[in-house]
Amino acid sequence: MAKVTGRIVVDTERCKGCAVCVPSCPFDVIALADEVNSKGFHYAYMKNPEACTGCTNCALVCPDAVIKVFRKKVTA
């Protein structure tokens, strides 16, 4: 059986740092950055990328649709 890995891409300039995506991730992948974007918001990023499965929970709850999720099958 192939393992599925995922990754997210966050539009950091459009992210307003609401953090709704952070608790929605069952694998503790997402956090808010210490840095801020040009609008002064702490944006979401992958703090634990190797744990991402591409479940899409973060993208589904994002009110501004700034998260894209990608999945890839990895054969062992």
Image (cartoon, rainbow, N blue to C red):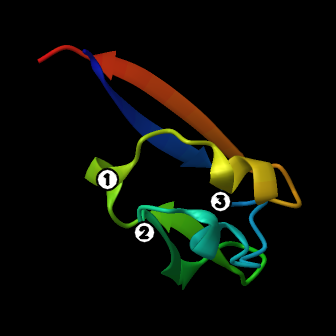
Contact (Cβ within 8 Å) of mark 1 with mark 3: no
> Image quarter for residue 21?
bottom right
Q: Relative to residue 53, is residue 20 drawn left or right?
A: right
For marks 1 and 3 on the same chain, the one whose residue lies earlier in the sequence: 3
- Inspect the image, locate mark 3, and give the three-letter code of the amino acid beneath it: Thr
Q: Can residue 11 be seen in this view?
A: no
Compare residues 42 and 58 and report the one nearer the observer. Answer: 58
Q: Name the residue under label 1.
A: 51
Q: Relative to residue 72, is residue 74 drawn left or right?
A: left
The image shows residue 16 at horizontal and vertical percentages of 78, 73
The image shows residue 8 at horizontal and vertical percentages of 53, 44
The image shows residue 15 at horizontal and vertical percentages of 74, 65
> Image quarter for residue 1?
top left
Q: Name the residue under label 3.
A: 12
Q: Which label is found at residue 28?
A: 2
| Residue found 27% across the figure and 49% down from its top | 50
Q: SS class of the residue under badge 3?
A: loop
Contact (Cβ within 8 Å) of mark 2 with mark 1: yes
Cα distance between the residues tagged 2 and 3 = 19 Å
Q: SS class of the residue under badge 1?
A: helix
Cα distance between the residues tagged 1 and 3 = 21 Å
- Inspect the image, locate mark 2, and give the three-letter code of the amino acid beneath it: Asp
Compare residues 72 and 38 and report the one nearer the observer. Answer: 72
Say if 24 sits above or below 42 in the image.
above
| Residue found 66% across the figure and 55% down from its top | 58
